Image: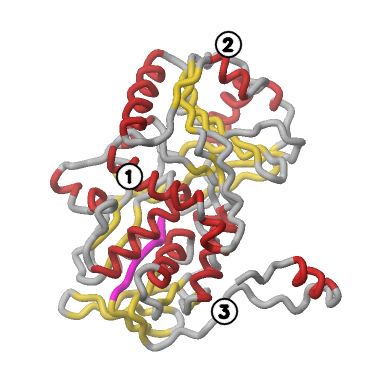
Amino acid sequence: MNRYSIFSLLRNAVNYHQDWQRAWRSPDPKRAYDVVIVGGGGHGLATAYYLASECGIRNVAVVEKGWLGGGNTGRNTTIVRSNYLYDESAGIYEHALKLWEGLSQELNYNVMFSPRGLLHLAHNVHDMQEIGRRGSAIRLNGIDSEFVSPTQVKKMVPFINLDCRYPVMGALLQRRGGTARHDAVAWGYARSADALGVDIIQNCEVTGFRIENNTVTGVDTSRGMIGAEKVGCVVAGHCGVLAGMAGFRLPVESVPLQALVSEPVKPILDCVVMSGSVHAYISQSDKGELVIGAGSDLYNSYSQRGSFDIIEETVGPVVELYPIFSRMKMLRQWGGIVDVTVDRSPILGKTPVNNLFFNCGWGTGGFKATPGSGNVFAHSIARGEIHPIAEPFSIDRFNTGALIDEGAAAAVAH
């Protein structure tokens, strides 16, 4: 698996790096598979990898209508954390964080996971009460979390303005939180899944499902029909479209979520700083760019641009909190399509169609869950029964009322 040693670099340098082996194959689809995963983003590729590596199911295909990681996996702000209020959320995100901590070693591929620490600022009395409540709940679940004073925040981020229009009264710190390289996550899972025999089929759009006696038997694609004993759908913002093809509706809405990055500068910010009240969060990439995350737009859309008013609402507080950035130039802005549920928590598990499983509804917080989501979803598909960590996120909770309302709990679900 170690194709990128110093000896490989020297050998390929002689030939201008023309003879590198492809990281994964581009096979034609077979007539049928044990499992077909629809969606070649981080969650889909992770599901395929764990099906092959932990569940012993290697006759698996991942079908992607575009290119790997071209959806939300490549359109996020790369934040990783597990400091969630509710036990159910803490369970799946902490499961993911533990996998993040050993992922580069497991995949033998550097996903550039950087546990640089994550600060969640409090700007008013309500914020202070919220982080106090959430911090206590997080610690009760055995997850690291600590309260820090404004003085400690200033020590971590010397250029922050504590006494601006949004005064910093304190913060919640998760030292194990941080960032990872989104593209590397997709590439690492793809390479490892391919090495285990998984077929990764790009430019293959799913156009419908084959369903007999309310049981899925395959998928229709732009490259022909592919048979499958089980199908798992992991397509983020387009999950509602696929559900419609299968004959049922999902309680999700698709909205644009946007972010922007600045011109690169020398290292200045060595942690992630979030602010729920003003909905602006910021980190610095390895290239020196300031990565600034905004909130989701208030209208349903499949646009991957977002609206300018959200940028204004985000950049304003950023400049107030960090005056040093006021003259920075923004290089680019982009948007992703997120699937949002009523309670801002995901849907993982079975659907009204037998052997058809959906993993969706991650909204604005899907990247950080990538390893944990793929792991529990793979085990759920393999066994035909939902993994205990994923069980609370069944679609049935919208009928029973057992919601996991992280949106109301933390003000921001990123």
Is 83 included in the stretch rendered in magenta? no
Mark 1 neighbour class, 10 Å CA radius: few under 14, some 14 to 19, many 20 or more? some
| Foreground disc of the pair 2, 1 | 1
Q: Amino acid at mark 3?
A: Arg
Residue 395 x %, y %: 22, 53
Which numbered circle lies on residue 25? 3
Range of magenta residues: 230-238
Upstream in the sequence, badge 2 or badge 3? 3
Which numbered circle lies on residue 163? 2
Q: CA distance from mark 2 to mark 1?
A: 36 Å
Mark 3 neighbour class, 10 Å CA radius: few under 14, some 14 to 19, many 20 or more? some
Q: Nearer the viewer, residue 24 or 363?
A: 24
Upstream in the sequence, badge 2 or badge 1? 1
Task: Determine whether 261 is above or below 277 in the image.
Answer: below
Task: Please tell me which residue is depicted at 58% across the width and 11% down the height of the picture.
Answer: 163
Is 234 included in the stretch rendered in magenta? yes
Residue 245 x %, y %: 30, 69
Upstream in the sequence, badge 3 or badge 1? 3
Which numbered circle lies on residue 91? 1
Task: Determine whether 80 is above or below 267 in the image.
Answer: below
